[in-house]
Image: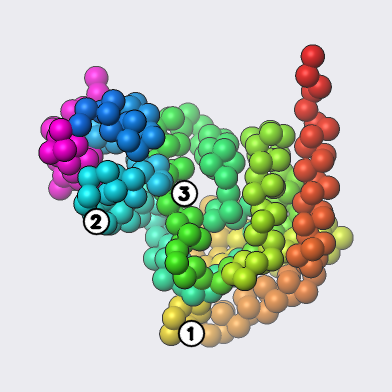
Amino acid sequence: MAQSSRDLDPAQSARNLYGVELRRQRQLAGLSLDRLSDIVNYSKTHLHGVETGERLPLPPLSEKLDAAFGTGELFRGLWGVVKREHTPRRFDHCLELEARAVRIQAFNASLIPGLLQTEAYMRALFAKGEAGISPEAIDSLTAARLGRQEILRRDCPPDLWWTINEAALQQAVGGPAVMREQLAALLPLMETRRTTIQVVPFEAGACSLMLGTLILLTLPDNSTTVYQEGPRNGEIFDDRETFMQRVRDYDRMKVCALSPRESAELIQATMETYESCESPQT
């Protein structure tokens, strides 16, 4: 039986606090779940799940709730706490720095970076990441990752430079349709005022970073912190020796990468291979 939001303990978790506050504001406004669903364009099922603490609020629900209730940035502020609560602990500090960074540089060996992932790609990853994972857990993980992408829509977003191994384009996460959508989402960001994407082709050969992820986060005071992640571990480095070594590794990867224009051409060519993978319609 679904738990009632009036039974939730708001002191137990940020998710519970969000659910309790949503129900309180909805009742103050005299709105049914059906009416609120029409206003914010989210399903009644999703809103009920948020109220009962069974689901995380998928972005941009928080902005729509604040607009509907006239609550300023109440739900956006609560969401900032909720999404940190549902992130693997090893990545917590990296996320805190990511939210403050003025420049983010990243290399990903086998997956599309989290800040660039489509919702369908995320869901496919999470569904395969842990045996027996529940739909509710997938919703929670997806909401948290979508929340990270809010930095791309800030009035003054950070400078972002992603270097992606060609293997990430070829790894058919979620199947051909999901991959076509995912690769198409990269193309508008290949080379803009704030974003650069380069692909390291297979011909570049082996490199020191090919087994994981490297993220360089530069803060407003011009300090840079390194986050490096392997298959089952992640670690933050801020000592100068490690920082300099990882920056050299990253610079070497950029040298081996295709230009943004050439990278876009490779992405478009890869998208065509996913089209040919699908069975023709009869």
Q: Which residue is denoted by mark 3 in the rendering?
A: 146
Q: Main secondary structure of the magenta part?
A: helix
Pick the front one: 272 or 69: 69
Task: Using a 10 Å C-alpha cutoff, classify the residue at mark 3 as few (fewer than 14 neighbours), some (14 to 19) or many (20 or more).
Answer: many
Colour basis: rainbow
Q: Quadrant of the C terminus?
A: top right
Pair 2/3: label in front: 2
Compared to 67, does 134 lie above or below?
above
Amino acid type of the residue that numbered disc 1 sits on in the rendered structure: Asn
Q: Residue at x 80, y 31 (%)?
A: 277
CA separation, marks 1 and 2?
A: 32 Å
Element type at marker 2? loop
Amino acid type of the residue that numbered disc 3 sits on in the rendered structure: Leu
**Does the CB distance between marks 1 and 2 fall below 8 Å?**
no
Compared to 28, does 1 lie above or below?
above
Q: Which residue is denoted by mark 2 in the rendering?
A: 72
* Position in image of residue 211 (x %, y %): 67, 58
**Does the CB distance between marks 2 and 3 fall below 8 Å?**
no
Earlier-in-chain disc, 2 versus 3? 2
CA separation, marks 2 and 3?
A: 21 Å
Q: Quadrant of residue 150?
A: bottom left
The residues colored magenta run 1-30
Left or right, 138 with respect to 215, comes to left
Task: Using a 10 Å C-alpha cutoff, classify the residue at mark 2 as few (fewer than 14 neighbours), some (14 to 19) or many (20 or more).
Answer: few
Amino acid type of the residue that numbered disc 2 sits on in the rendered structure: Gly
Pick the front one: 48 or 200: 48
* Position in image of residue 266 (x %, y %): 81, 54
Earlier-in-chain disc, 1 versus 2? 2
Task: Using a 10 Å C-alpha cutoff, classify the residue at mark 1 as few (fewer than 14 neighbours), some (14 to 19) or many (20 or more).
Answer: few
Q: Which residue is denoted by mark 1 in the rendering?
A: 222
Residue 21: within the magenta? yes
Q: Is residue 46 at all visible to an observer of this figure?
A: no
